[in-house]
Amino acid sequence: MVLAIFLGIEVISNVPSVLHTPLMSGANAISGVIIIGGIILVGHANLNHFSIELILGILAMLFGTLNVAGGFAVTDRMLEMFKKKKK
């Protein structure tokens, strides 16, 4: 696990800034799949009482939505860096 951490830091630090936006979009797509999985999990849960499926589904939708919204905010901010500034 420690090797994976160091490898991840090395890979991410060597990615040019031009590629950060497409990589963030890919992360948003993965989080979108997690949101859909959470919706399916909540749809199959028994809504009469709290079950592990209901709790996990709600958490997946919540954290997936936070990740997508944060990813779009970061992507928008990075794209602003590449726009020409008005004088």
Image (tube, grey):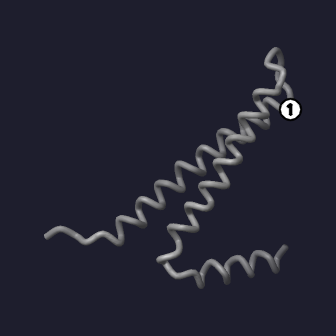
Residue 39 in the image, given as x and y percentages of width and height: 71, 34
Which residue is label 1 attached to? 52
Quadrant in which residue 77 is drawn: bottom left
Residue 36 in the image, given as x and y percentages of width and height: 69, 40
Quadrant in which residue 80 is drawn: bottom left
Residue shown at 52% from the left, 75% from the top: 19
Residue lying at the far left of the rendered structure: 87
Residue 6 in the image, given as x and y percentages of width and height: 74, 81
Q: With respect to residue 23, does 30 lie above or below?
A: above
Q: Residues within 10 Å of mark 1 (few under 14, many from 20)?
A: few
- Which sits in the foreground, 36 or 46? 36
Q: With respect to residue 39, does 23 lie above or below?
A: below
- Which sits in the foreground, 87 or 28? 28
Residue shown at 60% from the left, 43% from the top: 65
Residue shown at 25% from the left, 72% from the top: 84
Left or right of 2 in this view: 26: left
Tag 1: amino acid: Ile
